[in-house]
Image (cartoon, rainbow, N blue to C red):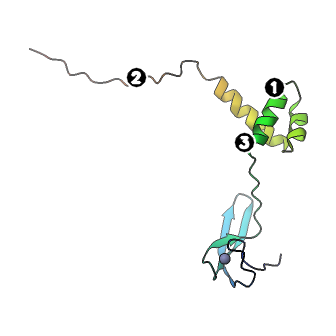
Amino acid sequence: MNMTGCLKCGDEKAVLQKSGFKKTKAGSFQRFLCTSCGKHFTGQERHRRHTAAEQQRALMEHEEGLSMRAAARLAGVHLRSVQRWIEKKQQILSRPTTTMPTPKKRAIPLKTP
Ligand SMILES: [Zn+2]
């Protein structure tokens, strides 16, 4: 991959200094320092966070009776993402219905005569 310019400030003539590596679960990525704006970034990372809309849509489609696979396809997300969201949702739903916080046991000082 050819690094041309800075991804942060958009300066195409910015001088990029190699600045160590950023370690993620996906591996190590060369980290760059832009001498123009002074920000660090890596060029190879692919963070694709799903929007709340995508998530909602996938969950809705699934609730409508579609399979996870179909819901994932329609929402344009990965099947694994939908599985994760559904698991998370079921965890929330399976919680006890009493959402009232359990009162902390206070040590009430007994007034002894
Ligand atoms: Zn920059």
**Percent x, y for residue 55?**
76, 39
Q: Residues within 10 Å of mark 3 (few under 14, many from 20)?
A: few
Query: Which residue is pictured at 35% across the width and 23% down the height?
Result: 105
Mark sitting on residue 63: 1
First-in-chain label (3 vs 1): 3
Q: Is residue 107 left or right of residue 67?
A: left
- Spatial separation of the CA atoms under disc 2 and disc 3: 33 Å
Q: Residue at x 46, y 24 (%)?
A: 101
Q: Element at badge 1?
A: helix
Residue 103 image label? 2
Which of the marked residues, 2 or 3, is nearer the chain's N terminus? 3
Give me the residue at 31% from left, 24% from top.
Answer: 106
Q: The residue tagged with tag 3: helix, strand or loop?
A: helix
Looking at marks 2 and 1 on the same chain, the residue that comes earlier in the sequence is marked by 1
Q: Quadrant of the C terminus?
A: top left
| Whole-percent x, y for residue 86 in the image | 75, 32
Q: Is mark 3 within 8 Å of ligand 1?
A: no
Of discs 2 and 1, which sits in the foreground?
1
Amino acid at dot 3: Ala
